[in-house]
Amino acid sequence: MSIFIDTSAFLALLNKEDHFHQIAKNTWEEINLSEEYLISSNYVIIETISLLQKRFGIEAVRIFDNEVRPVIDIIWIDQTIHHAGMVVVLTTNHRKLSLVDCTSFEILRTLHVEKVFTLDSHFFEQGFNIFPELK
Protein backbone atom coordinates (compact mmCIF):
# COMPACT_ATOMS: atom_id res chain seq x y z
CA MET A 1 0.00 0.00 0.00
CA SER A 2 1.17 3.55 -0.75
CA ILE A 3 1.18 6.77 1.20
CA PHE A 4 1.30 10.07 -0.68
CA ILE A 5 3.23 12.83 1.09
CA ASP A 6 2.20 16.45 0.63
CA THR A 7 4.21 19.67 0.95
CA SER A 8 2.49 20.62 4.20
CA ALA A 9 3.79 17.45 5.87
CA PHE A 10 7.33 18.01 4.62
CA LEU A 11 7.33 21.61 5.87
CA ALA A 12 5.97 20.72 9.31
CA LEU A 13 8.48 17.89 9.59
CA LEU A 14 11.46 20.12 8.82
CA ASN A 15 10.41 23.27 10.69
CA LYS A 16 10.90 22.84 14.45
CA GLU A 17 8.92 26.06 15.00
CA ASP A 18 5.86 24.76 13.14
CA HIS A 19 2.78 24.25 15.30
CA PHE A 20 2.43 20.71 13.87
CA HIS A 21 6.15 19.79 13.97
CA GLN A 22 5.97 17.18 16.73
CA ILE A 23 2.89 15.55 15.25
CA ALA A 24 4.54 15.49 11.81
CA LYS A 25 7.76 14.09 13.28
CA ASN A 26 5.87 11.32 15.11
CA THR A 27 3.89 10.50 11.98
CA TRP A 28 7.07 10.42 9.86
CA GLU A 29 8.72 8.02 12.32
CA GLU A 30 5.62 5.80 12.30
CA ILE A 31 5.55 5.79 8.49
CA ASN A 32 9.22 4.87 8.27
CA LEU A 33 8.69 1.88 10.54
CA SER A 34 5.83 0.64 8.39
CA GLU A 35 6.05 -1.32 5.17
CA GLU A 36 4.24 1.45 3.28
CA TYR A 37 5.52 2.61 -0.09
CA LEU A 38 6.12 6.39 0.10
CA ILE A 39 5.30 8.54 -2.92
CA SER A 40 5.01 12.17 -3.84
CA SER A 41 5.06 14.15 -7.08
CA ASN A 42 7.74 16.22 -8.70
CA TYR A 43 5.40 19.23 -8.32
CA VAL A 44 5.23 18.65 -4.55
CA ILE A 45 9.01 18.30 -4.40
CA ILE A 46 9.50 21.55 -6.35
CA GLU A 47 6.99 23.37 -4.15
CA THR A 48 8.66 22.02 -1.00
CA ILE A 49 12.16 22.98 -2.09
CA SER A 50 11.03 26.44 -3.14
CA LEU A 51 9.33 27.10 0.20
CA LEU A 52 12.19 25.65 2.24
CA GLN A 53 14.74 27.76 0.40
CA LYS A 54 12.68 30.95 0.71
CA ARG A 55 11.76 30.49 4.38
CA PHE A 56 14.80 28.71 5.86
CA GLY A 57 17.69 28.84 3.41
CA ILE A 58 19.74 26.41 1.40
CA GLU A 59 20.73 24.28 4.40
CA ALA A 60 17.08 23.27 4.86
CA VAL A 61 16.98 22.28 1.19
CA ARG A 62 20.15 20.25 1.66
CA ILE A 63 18.67 18.40 4.66
CA PHE A 64 15.47 17.68 2.74
CA ASP A 65 17.36 16.48 -0.33
CA ASN A 66 19.80 14.30 1.64
CA GLU A 67 17.62 12.88 4.41
CA VAL A 68 13.97 12.96 3.37
CA ARG A 69 13.68 12.90 -0.41
CA PRO A 70 15.71 9.69 -0.97
CA VAL A 71 13.05 7.52 0.71
CA ILE A 72 10.26 8.93 -1.47
CA ASP A 73 9.40 7.57 -4.91
CA ILE A 74 8.63 10.55 -7.14
CA ILE A 75 5.73 10.39 -9.55
CA TRP A 76 6.43 12.72 -12.47
CA ILE A 77 3.57 14.91 -13.63
CA ASP A 78 2.93 14.40 -17.32
CA GLN A 79 0.91 16.53 -19.72
CA THR A 80 -2.32 14.60 -19.01
CA ILE A 81 -2.12 15.04 -15.23
CA HIS A 82 -1.09 18.68 -15.57
CA HIS A 83 -4.03 19.37 -17.88
CA ALA A 84 -6.49 17.59 -15.56
CA GLY A 85 -5.18 19.67 -12.63
CA MET A 86 -5.53 22.89 -14.60
CA VAL A 87 -9.12 22.05 -15.50
CA VAL A 88 -9.95 21.66 -11.81
CA VAL A 89 -8.16 24.88 -10.86
CA LEU A 90 -9.97 26.85 -13.54
CA THR A 91 -13.43 25.35 -13.00
CA THR A 92 -13.55 25.37 -9.20
CA ASN A 93 -12.58 29.04 -8.91
CA HIS A 94 -11.19 28.34 -5.43
CA ARG A 95 -8.29 30.67 -4.55
CA LYS A 96 -6.68 28.33 -2.04
CA LEU A 97 -6.82 25.18 -4.18
CA SER A 98 -3.46 25.09 -5.94
CA LEU A 99 -2.39 23.41 -9.14
CA VAL A 100 -0.01 21.27 -7.07
CA ASP A 101 -2.92 20.04 -4.94
CA CYS A 102 -5.11 19.37 -7.98
CA THR A 103 -2.39 17.35 -9.71
CA SER A 104 -1.87 15.46 -6.44
CA PHE A 105 -5.58 14.57 -6.35
CA GLU A 106 -5.34 13.29 -9.92
CA ILE A 107 -2.34 11.10 -9.08
CA LEU A 108 -4.09 9.72 -6.00
CA ARG A 109 -7.20 8.82 -7.98
CA THR A 110 -5.27 7.38 -10.93
CA LEU A 111 -3.04 5.20 -8.73
CA HIS A 112 -5.87 4.38 -6.28
CA VAL A 113 -3.92 5.76 -3.33
CA GLU A 114 -6.14 6.53 -0.35
CA LYS A 115 -3.68 7.52 2.38
CA VAL A 116 -2.07 10.95 2.49
CA PHE A 117 0.41 12.36 5.00
CA THR A 118 -0.69 15.99 4.98
CA LEU A 119 -1.81 18.88 7.12
CA ASP A 120 -3.90 20.30 4.28
CA SER A 121 -7.65 19.76 4.76
CA HIS A 122 -8.27 19.91 1.00
CA PHE A 123 -7.22 16.26 0.78
CA PHE A 124 -9.85 15.29 3.36
CA GLU A 125 -12.44 17.35 1.49
CA GLN A 126 -11.59 15.35 -1.63
CA GLY A 127 -12.32 12.09 0.20
CA PHE A 128 -8.83 10.86 1.00
CA ASN A 129 -7.74 9.35 4.31
CA ILE A 130 -5.34 11.86 5.82
CA PHE A 131 -3.04 11.56 8.75
CA PRO A 132 -2.35 12.82 11.17
CA GLU A 133 -6.04 13.47 11.71
CA LEU A 134 -6.75 17.18 11.79
CA LYS A 135 -8.82 18.28 14.75
Image (cartoon, rainbow, N blue to C red):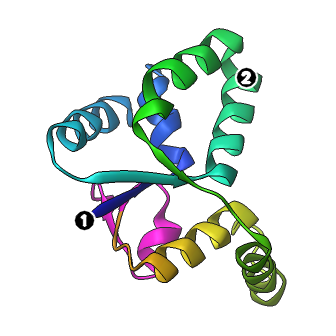
Location of residue 66 with respect to 103 vertically, above or below = above
Quadrant assignment for the C terminus: bottom left
Q: Residue at x 47, y 65 (%)?
A: 121
Location of residue 79 with respect to 130 vertically, above or below = below
Is residue 25 left or right of 20 when viewed as pictured?
left
Q: Which residue is mark 2?
A: 53
Q: In this view of the protein, which residue sits in the foreground, 58 or 80?
A: 80
Q: Residue at x 48, y 73 (%)?
A: 108
Estimate the spatial distance between the alpha carbons at disc 1 and disc 2, rounded to whole Å.
31 Å
Q: Where is residue 29? Give x, y as percent.
A: 22, 33
Secondary structure beneath label 2: helix
Q: Residue at x 29, y 57 (%)?
A: 131
Q: Which residue is mark 1?
A: 1
Q: Is disc 1 in contact with disc 2, using a CB cutoff of under 8 Å?
A: no
Q: Residue at x 63, y 20 (%)?
A: 61
Name the image quarter holding residue 106. bottom right
Part of the protein shown in magenta: 116-135
Question: Looking at the image, is mark 1 or mark 2 nearer the viewer?
Answer: 1
Residue furthest to the top in view is: 59
Looking at the image, can residue 88 be seen? yes
Q: Where is residue 8? Give x, y as percent.
A: 52, 46
Residue 22 painted magenta? no
Q: Where is residue 38? Give x, y as percent.
A: 36, 50
